[in-house]
Image (cartoon, rainbow, N blue to C red):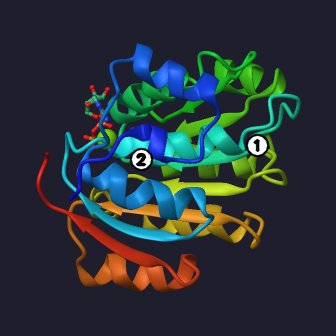
Amino acid sequence: MSSQNFSSLDLASDFLDNLKSLGYHTMTPIQSQALPLALAGQDLLAKGKTGSGKTAAFGICLARKLRPSVSRPQSIVLCPTRELADQIATELRRLARRMPNIKVLTLTGGIPIGPQLRSLAHGAHIVVGTPGRIADHLRKRSLDLRNVNTLVLDEADRMLDMGFIESVECIVQQLPTKRQTLLFSATFPDNILELSQKILSNPVRIEAESNN
Ligand code: ADP
Ligand code: MG
């Protein structure tokens, strides 16, 4: 019994209505495994393939914790590429569209840093980006991590394959230690297990192989 309705989760009715309006009725397997644990504050080491609905699996958890009145970043989502960051940001904006003025900012490499600095100066609730550029912002002291309560690593195996391990570790070292960390990966090679031991706290390991 892996199919479950989103209404079984502890979510506000406004938020559930928005999910319905997005056409989200039944949770995908990774969502039904991850969300009850993530919403209860657990760290997760989650295996999930492309198209399995990972973004909402963490996005709903981020959205529920958001405090709109705090305009400093509360969640950081690390992912391997600019295209993925844009896709994740679009999905997060859809999930949060009934919440007042939630700003989701993408910080990725390969584009000028100036406009990113200006956007950051105006505040953001969620930052989605690639590890190299986020580490650049930390060196420039343009990104304030003090209010971050959730770190997500999406497609973690690809991030490490692309050589981002040092940047990931540099970012994690500067995050509050009291936080929730959710790591998603299509595979669990040794380097992912090593990283997870360093950055996750008593994680629950979940695997959802099928797409339905
Ligand atoms: P992944 O990150 O695992 O590759 P996505 O989070 O991008 O997958 O989701 C894939 C697609 O499925 C997106 O278009 C998303 O809007 C849609 N989707 C996710 N969860 C659900 C759901 N529970 N019901 C319907 N559509 C969903
Ligand atoms: Mg994805």
Ligand 2 occupies quarter: top left
Compared across the picture, whether 74 is left or right of 182 comes to right
Q: Which residue is mark 2?
A: 57
Q: Earlier in the sequence, mark 1 or mark 2?
A: 2
Residue at image point 62% right, 22% down:
14
**Above-or-below relation of 75 to 111:** below
Dividing the image into 4 quarters, which one contains the C terminus? top left
Residue at image point 24% right, 48% down:
3
**Above-or-below relation of 158 to 99:** below
Name the outermost residue toward the right: 69
Disc 2 under 8 Å from ligand 1? The reply is yes
Quadrant of res 23: top left
Task: Check disc 1 and give the amino acid type.
Answer: Leu
Task: Check disc 2 and give the amino acid type.
Answer: Ala
Local secondary structure at mark 1:
loop
Category of crowding for the residue at label 2, using alpha-carbon neighbours closer than 10 angstroms: few (below 14), some (14–19), many (at least 20): many
Q: Which residue is mark 1?
A: 143
Q: Is residue 113 visible?
A: no
Disc 1 under 8 Å from ligand 2? The reply is no
Nearest the eye: 181 or 9: 9
Category of crowding for the residue at label 1, using alpha-carbon neighbours closer than 10 angstroms: few (below 14), some (14–19), many (at least 20): many
Residue 164 is situated, as x and y percent measured from the top left of the image, at 42, 60
Compared across the picture, whether 75 is left or right of 132 comes to right
